[in-house]
Image (cartoon, rainbow, N blue to C red):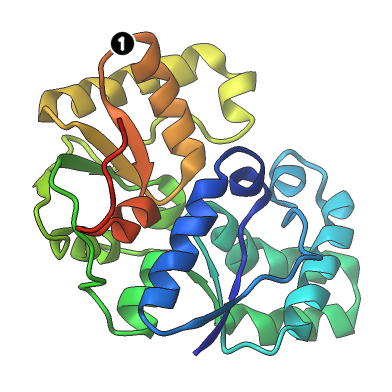
Amino acid sequence: MRVALFITCFNDTLFPQVGMATTHVLERLGHTVEFPEAQTCCGQMHYNTGYQREAIPLVRHFVEVFSAANVEAIVAPSASCVGMVRELYPRAAALSGDKTLIGAVANLIPRVYELSEFLVRRNGTVDVGAYFPHRVTYHPTCHSLRVLHLGDAPLQLLRAVKGIDLAELPNDAECCGFGGTFAIKNADTSLAMLGDKMRGVLDTGAEVLCSADTSCLMHIGGGLHRLRAGVRTLHLAEILAHTETMTEEA
């Protein structure tokens, strides 16, 4: 299948290894991965901060770039940004009053998938040939739970990883406190939520915290780093990309 990689600006800027890992997994499964280089921010930050009209040009650009790609699916390693496209693009298009954009958004949305959603539900794949002999716990992000309703798709993929010791995260459905600009505008509340989440992670005894959004991993990972807790954070794609032939990081 021909797949377009929607990398998201957060990953492109701060976590490029996640995009590479996503590509490795998709290509290992026989997909041809295209990367539309003209893609930019999806506009989520603008829209969620109250600048809905300012986000419309970004919505229009995204639709133009990915509609022009000759692919069957558009896959992103980010439940948050896929949630923006699926839930808020129709609202932004309606706000624009542009019937052409409204139609283009409606035509594009069915082809946009979060990585685990694409693998499990679209591709029917659970075992991607990964090997990761470590104790891991998984944090389901708010967007993956409440917007995309991914359910246990990420966990199905993790359970199929050879050698993994998967530990259940206590109160896993609770928000980590990041929420984009929420963590800046409501720092005290955010830190209290982060403290609860870190306590749950540490209670699992996990070596690695995994999630489907690097934004949440950055927030939780920063807190764990300040505690010198010795817990690594890895995106789901990075674990799925790992095989027995890969050398462990120091």
Label 1, residues with CA under 10 Å away: few <14, some 14-19, many ≥20:
few
Q: Where is residue 235 drawn, in percent x and y?
A: 39, 47
Left or right of residue 198: residue 215: right
Q: Where is residue 20 drawn, in percent x and y?
A: 51, 57
Residue drawn at x 20%, y 65% as measured from the top left: 156
Residue drawn at x 44%, y 21% as measured from the top left: 222
Quadrant of the frame with the C terminus: top left
Q: Quadrant of residue 45?
A: top right
Q: Can residue 177 be seen here?
A: no
Residue 134 or residue 146, whichever sits in front: 134
Q: Quadrant of residue 36?
A: bottom right
Left or right of residue 79: residue 197: left
Q: Is residue 67 above or below residue 205?
A: below
Left or right of residue 231: residue 190: right
Q: Can residue 230 be seen here?
A: yes
Q: Is residue 3 above or below residue 182?
A: below
Residue holding disc 1: 228
Residue drawn at x 40%, y 26% as measured from the top left: 221
Residue 147 or residue 18, whichever sits in front: 18
The secondary element bearing badge 1 is classed as loop
Residue drawn at x 12%, y 30% as measured from the top left: 204
Q: Is residue 25 above or below residue 146?
A: below
Q: Where is residue 199 drawn, in percent x and y?
A: 22, 20
Q: Where is residue 142 drawn, in percent x and y?
A: 42, 46
Label 1 sits on what residue type?
Arg
